[in-house]
């Protein structure tokens, strides 16, 4: 097992490079920007359907109104994603443009939305009340058109890059105001992108007889079918956990490629449910509630196991500190506090638990009558509650939750016990060195600020170092007495992570620390990829461990804007979230 972990460490830079792929980033961040559409539309449907679960019948006009709100939000999801994906892809492309050449992200956003409509939507005429009407087929404007949205976004930005980098734009005299001149500069690339997508649409419709979006779905349907089998679900879940185990945020790599079909399947499940049928798709957006039950690695039950069954003071302390955040799928305190990342003892359960969970979920959906997930709930919803809601409040879903909690406990417990024995032996050795009783010394050890695991074997030392390793550039160590000299009055700090959950922990600690010390410091939490429009309002940006692989890209932006960029190591970050005053001191020490 140690040899496997060492081999994985050697390939960590390769996997980090994958996570920084600009296409995957654009898809992930573009989709994240449209999450309010997904969540808000689900609320309207819950309003329309929840009363029926308890035997209450709502007035039909109210139900129709809720359905209209859903159709005009989720029903145009594809168009919106085309725009947000293009906007984020433009931001990445601008970092690679020659000096003085900049792509207009507002223009690329609109051009991508127009191009997506050309690729995905069919226009035809029909008769209504004796008159001919020109209408759109809206089927592919929503989740069914997401793949077309991505292609439209990428084509658009590349056309803009080609035109702008070669000065293929309309130039006006310098006396013309900049905003007006920019509109004319965008005409040629805008027209080029729309024309190219229009040509693709004409060619595909004439040769294949279907819109481009439908052709994509037909070509990819064998992959979608395979992904919804037991091996497919297991492979997806194993890859997600595996990447996180080696320190690379797994969902950022795996989910962008499958989110379109997951969301489309969940929307289809919802329509079947509303029609009175049995939603049968298992590869859905909220299957992450099962596969990442309490966070990647299916760690929902782990903090409780640490508290109840472990003897090591360190693991008990980690369990107590992580039990609340893990309940809301924020499990970084556990991943870096135990640690679990790159810990040889944790590789098997960390990967296996989620795989078992999704397999049991598919069995329940296919054979036991549990509904496939239909209503979309936020990722931070406590998993048992989220599963109960998204299955339309089925009691069998509660039985399912109880079963996977038990299975996860069975999977994790033997490995945790073995790891606990190692730590207890280390605590006993430490106690012997100090001439104290084992229990008392262990208490001292657990309360110190030493690294999370002070292993005696070379292999586990490597694990701890790798879990806290710097994926990009090491930051200079601050002088010991610097904290007393740095002026932080009026400082504005933005903390970024993958989904704004882990970043909120440190942002809140900084707020609390500022209140304790009387400092005038403002802190906010955000999601990486949604920061570009607001980052210039801050003096310091802190990257959480989830997104430290983006350090180099972020450094280019912060240097340009004169912003200080900090990227604490895994355990250091978690320690700061628990020590508000220490977080303020850390900020002082790291300001130049």
Image (spheres, helix red, strand yellow):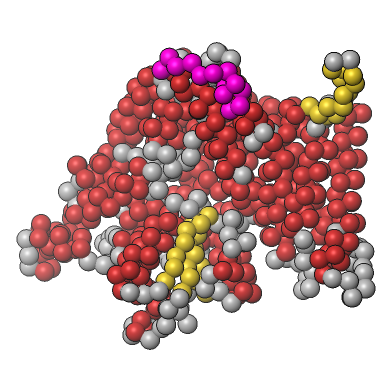
**Residue situated in front as seen by the camera: 122 or 310:** 122
Task: Determine the image quadrant of residue 290.
Answer: top left
Image coordinates for residue 233, horizontal then vertical, percent: 52, 31
User: Would you say residue 2 is visible in this rendering?
Assistant: no
Q: Is residue 132 left or right of residue 551?
A: right
**Residue situated in front as seen by the camera: 107 or 499:** 107
Image coordinates for residue 133, horizontal then vertical, percent: 87, 24
Image coordinates for residue 200, horizontal then vertical, percent: 87, 39
Above or below: residue 579 compared with residue 134: below
Above or below: residue 88 compared with residue 522: above
Q: Is residue 170 left or right of residue 424?
A: right
Q: How many marks?
A: 0
- Residue depicted at 63% across the width and 34% down the height: 74
Whether the magenta-drawn stretch holds residue 121 is answered as no
Whether the magenta-drawn stretch holds residue 57 is answered as yes
Image coordinates for residue 376, horizontal then vertical, percent: 52, 33
- Residue depicted at 68% across the width and 60% down the height: 92
**Residue situated in front as seen by the camera: 204 or 562:** 562
User: Would you say residue 22 is visible in this rendering?
Assistant: yes
Above or below: residue 170 compared with residue 586: above
Over which residues does the magenta segment extend? 54-66
Q: Is residue 486 left or right of residue 531?
A: left
- Residue depicted at 75% across the width and 48% down the height: 153
- Residue depicted at 20% across the width and 60% down the height: 446
**Residue situated in front as seen by the camera: 60 or 482:** 60
């Amino acid at each position: 097992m140690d040899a496997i972990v060492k081999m994985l460490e050697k390939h960590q830079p390769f996997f980090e490079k994958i996570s920084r792929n600009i296409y995957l980033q654009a898809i992930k961040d573009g989709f994240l920007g449209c999450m309010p559409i997904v969540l808000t539309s689900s609320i309207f449907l819950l309003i329309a359907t929840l009363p029926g679960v308890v035997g209450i019948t709502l007035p039909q006009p109210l139900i129709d109104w809720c359905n209209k709100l859903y159709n005009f939000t989720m029903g145009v999801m594809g168009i919106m994603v085309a725009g947000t994906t293009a906007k984020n892809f433009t931001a990445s492309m601008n970092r690679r443009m020659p000096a003085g050449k900049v792509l207009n992200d507002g223009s690329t956003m609109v051009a991508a939305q127009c191009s997506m409509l050309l690729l995905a939507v069919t226009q035809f005429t029909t008769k209504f009340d004796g008159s001919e009407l020109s209408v759109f087929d809206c089927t592919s404007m929503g989740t069914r058109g997401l793949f077309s949205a991505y292609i439209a976004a990428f084509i658009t930005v590349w056309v803009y890059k080609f035109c702008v980098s070669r000065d293929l734009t309309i130039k006006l005299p310098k006396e013309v105001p900049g905003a007006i001149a920019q509109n004319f500069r965008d005409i040629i690339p805008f027209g080029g992108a729309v024309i190219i997508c229009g040509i693709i649409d004409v060619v595909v419709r004439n040769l294949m007889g279907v819109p481009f979006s439908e052709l994509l779905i037909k070509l990819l349907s064998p992959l979608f079918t395979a992904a919804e089998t037991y091996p497919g679900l297991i492979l997806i879940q194993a890859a997600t956990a595996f990447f996180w185990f080696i320190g690379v945020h797994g969902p950022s790599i795996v989910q962008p490629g499958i989110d379109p079909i997951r969301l489309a399947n969940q929307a289809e499940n919802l329509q079947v449910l509303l029609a009175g049928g049995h939603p049968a798709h298992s590869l859905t957006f909220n299957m992450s509630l099962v596969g990442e039950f309490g966070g990647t690695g299916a760690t929902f039950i782990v903090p409780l196991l640490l508290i109840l069954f472990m003897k090591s003071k360190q693991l008990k302390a980690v369990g107590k500190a992580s039990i609340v955040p893990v309940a809301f799928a924020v499990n970084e305190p556990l991943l870096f506090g135990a640690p679990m990342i790159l810990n040889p003892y944790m590789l098997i359960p960390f990967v296996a638990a989620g795989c078992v969970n999704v397999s049991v979920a598919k069995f329940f959906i296919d054979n036991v009558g549990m509904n496939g997930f239909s209503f979309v709930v936020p990722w931070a919803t406590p998993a048992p509650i989220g599963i109960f809601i998204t299955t339309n409040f089925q009691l069998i879903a509660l039985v399912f939750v109880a079963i996977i909690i038990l299975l996860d406990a069975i999977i994790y417990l033997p490995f945790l016990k073995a790891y606990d024995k190692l730590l207890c032996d280390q605590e006993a050795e430490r106690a012997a060195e100090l001439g104290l009783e084992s229990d008392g010394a262990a208490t001292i050890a657990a309360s110190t600020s030493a690294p999370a695991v002070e292993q005696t074997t070379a292999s586990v030392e490597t694990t701890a170092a790798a879990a806290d390793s710097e994926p990009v550039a090491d930051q200079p160590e601050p002088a010991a007495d610097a904290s007393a000299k740095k002026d932080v009055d009026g400082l504005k700090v933005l903390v970024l992570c993958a989904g704004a959950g882990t970043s909120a922990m440190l942002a809140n600690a900084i707020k609390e620390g500022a209140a304790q010390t009387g400092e005038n410091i403002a802190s906010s939490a955000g999601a990486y990829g949604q920061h570009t429009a607001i980052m210039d309002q801050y003096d310091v940006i802190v990257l959480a461990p989830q997104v430290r692989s983006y350090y180099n890209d972020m450094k280019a932006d912060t240097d340009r804007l004169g912003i200080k960029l900090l990227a604490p190591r895994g355990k250091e970050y978690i320690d700061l979230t628990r020590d508000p005053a220490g977080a303020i001191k850390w900020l002082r020490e790291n300001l130049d």
